[in-house]
Image: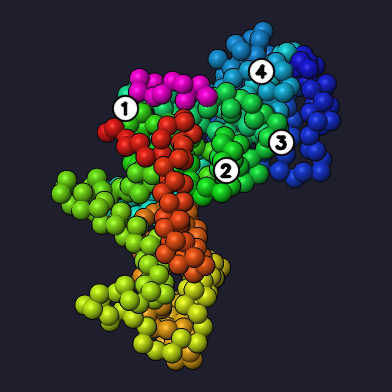
Amino acid sequence: MKVSRIVQENIAYMNELLPVQESYDIVERDIVIGGRESCFFFIDGFMKDEVMSKLMDTFFKITEDQMPDTATEFSRSFVSYVEIDTFSEYDKVIKNLLSGAACLFVEGYDACIIIDSRTYPARNVGEPEQDKSLRGSRDGFVETIVFNTALIRRRIRDPHLTMKMMEIGKSSRTDVVLCYMSDRVNTDLLALLTRKIEEMQDEDLKMNQQSLAELLFKRKWYNPFPKFKYTERPDTATACLLEGKIVLMVDTSPSAMILPTSIFDMIEEANDYYFPTLTGIYLKLSRSLITIMTIFLTPLFLLFMQNPKWIPDIFEFVLVRDTVNIPLYFQLLLLELAIDGLRLAALNTPSMLSTPLSVIAGIVMGEFSVKSGWFNSEVMLYMAFVAVANYTQPNFELGYALKFMRLLLLTLTALFDWVGFAAGCIITVCSICFNRTVSGESYLKISKN
């Protein structure tokens, strides 16, 4: 439907479409501009009061003989703000209003004047909690997409950097930005992502970025290795853009989605590049070795405990000497669940209590559980190493993928001894080797810097 020249008809239609009387935050403000009846519609909380005060002060000074013939001429002559536009269709007017812009209807104009003077509530661009760097920038993405794109634009002053805004969902109308370097990006992947996002118009991003990831790629449930890399660091996103990757950012999400992503991209972090080459290589190798140990340490321990004759004399000290009241497999399984329980409890624990409660949990889980006979000290040691080592790589999804592989290895080893361990190793390797990125490339492909 088109915007009418009669302002009362526009007001009536806007009140019919929107719950102006019921919703306190949708504000209707009737004013007179140049002797003509006019009306503002805006969302309380998104509006900058000082900007609107200056604009209205300008409007009240306009005389009847100064009023131009069209809304476009009016916006050019009297709206002293940078981001303005005019729309003659109500669909676009409603979209901009609900996004936070102010809508101005003036008697005699067949178009609505959109004044984008909105401001979103946002926190400071501080360093992310989960992806910290020993050296380098201390800023991070926030929930406001405009701030996030500005953090990237600040680092890449290249005309090839493109920020393509798209919208998903009939109800949520979530803003999504495709960020890429037009001279380096894989054009086939870009076309594929653009087509998939355009086909999502009926889908609402109920769970924000995770919903977008599920819609973009219907991954197989039995392969837990992640298809996307997430980061809250602008410098990491910038480095990936300069490598030819695509960065997807969703409004209200403080992280960026990077694709395509291989297993080697998953285990990288910013510290690898903020130190000299030798130090960076050492950090990568040590983290990779520790990551591999988190998968195989406890299954290997279980395998050798089931076959003590395989242990060389020099390593006989690793044998469990104490009485085993509960089978080792069930001890390891219980501790895997207990560690996840402590992690989930820490998320919901008030910050002032997290330290004392973690100390109490450590004492109870450590000393008392061994003395009570539930667990052996060797099992506690190896599981403690696995629990701490999981935090050497920042990717949360990869950490749980490795955990599932470890549980599979433990179960197969407990059931079928060395045959089960060998089968578990083959399944783990195949899960990585036969996995594919969103672009269809190998999961083992090394990025070219």
In this figure, which residue is indicated by the disc labeled 4? 87
Q: Residue at x 33, y 76 (%)?
A: 309
The residue mark sitting in front, 1 or 2, is: 2
The residue beneath circle 1 is 157
Which residue lies under the disc numbered 3? 171
Q: Amino acid at mark 4?
A: Phe
Nearer-N-terminus badge (4/1)? 4
Q: Quadrant of residue 66?
A: top right
Q: Crowding near pointer 1: few (<14 within 10 Å), some, many (20+)?
A: few
Q: Is residue 119 visible?
A: no
Which secondary structure lies at badge 2?
loop
Specify start and end residues of the magenta stretch as a single range: 182-192
Circles 1 and 2 in contact, beta carbons < 8 Å: no
Q: Nearer the viewer, mark 2 or mark 4?
A: 2
Q: Earlier in the sequence, mark 1 or mark 3?
A: 1
Spatial separation of the CA atoms under disc 1 and disc 3: 35 Å
